[in-house]
Amino acid sequence: MTTSTDVVILQADLRRPDHQAAVVAITAAYALDRMANGAPLPPDVLERLIPGLQAHPTTLVFLAAVGGQFVGLATCFVGFSTFAARPVVNLHDLCVLDSHRGQGIGRALLRAVEQVALERGCAKVTLEVLEHNRPARSLYESLGFTPAVYRPENGLALFYAKSLSGD
């Protein structure tokens, strides 16, 4: 558990109903952001979210609370680097509710993710960010994140995706 001023960061226990409700609510709010999904998540996705996270063997979720109210979330998954032969934490979602942005909560969540990654012997923390999401990029860069370059002569590593659901 990490505390900064009145912000408390804790690793979510996805068996707890209050943590489950917070993860669903904050993820739903995040999906509405134009730098995320830009639209509401369908009800069936929200219904499957907690069981899916619980079933995924590498799920790692952090919640940020202010005054006992959950206001931020970091959803991560542990992977593996074959070139380092060590685990890697991928930050999949980082969200702070609009009402609490600019208060250092995202920074506190990222520091908690990094601390757990260090404790687990991870080689790195990875994330994806939209090119035009300047506030997020500024936060990430202030904490030492950079575009991935494995060998400078080969250029930047790019993140690609292929939808398998027709979306």
Image (cartoon, rainbow, N blue to C red):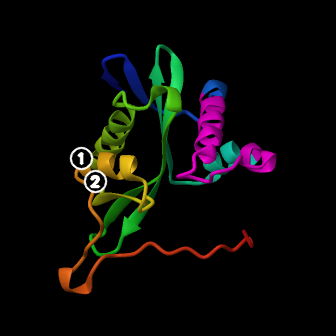
Q: What residue lies at 59% left-to-right and 29% top-to-bottom? A: 19
* Residue at the extreme right: 44
Residue 95 horizontal/vertical position (percent) = 49, 40
Q: Secondary structure at mark 2?
A: loop
Residue 92 horizontal/vertical position (percent) = 49, 54
- Between 5 and 141, the one lying in front of the other is 141
Q: Is residue 110 left or right of residue 100?
A: left
For residue 53: magenta?
no
Q: What residue lies at 31% left-to-right and 45% top-to-bottom? A: 139
Q: Secondary structure at mark 1?
A: helix
Query: With respect to residue 31, does 3 lie above or below?
Result: above
Q: Which residues are magenta?
A: 19-47
Q: Amino acid at mark 2?
A: Gly
Residue 55 horizontal/vertical position (percent) = 64, 51
Q: Amino acid at mark 1?
A: Ser
| Disc 2 residue crowd, few under 14, some 14–19, many 20+, Cα 10 Å | few
* Residue at the extreme top: 67
Q: Is residue 98 left or right of residue 41?
A: left
- Between 78 and 157, the one lying in front of the other is 157
Q: What residue lies at 62% left-to-right and 38% top-to-bottom? A: 29
Q: Which residue is mark 1?
A: 142
Residue 98 horizontal/vertical position (percent) = 51, 32
Query: With respect to residue 108, does 140 lie above or below?
Result: below
Q: CA distance from mark 2 to mark 1?
A: 23 Å
For residue 33: magenta?
yes
Of badges 2 and 1, nearer the viewer stands 1
- Between 59 and 5, the one lying in front of the other is 5
Q: Is residue 112 left or right of residue 20?
A: left
Q: In the rendered view of the protein, which quadrant contains the N terminus?
A: top left
Tell me the number on the disc at residue 121: 2
| Occupied quadrant, residue 10 | top left
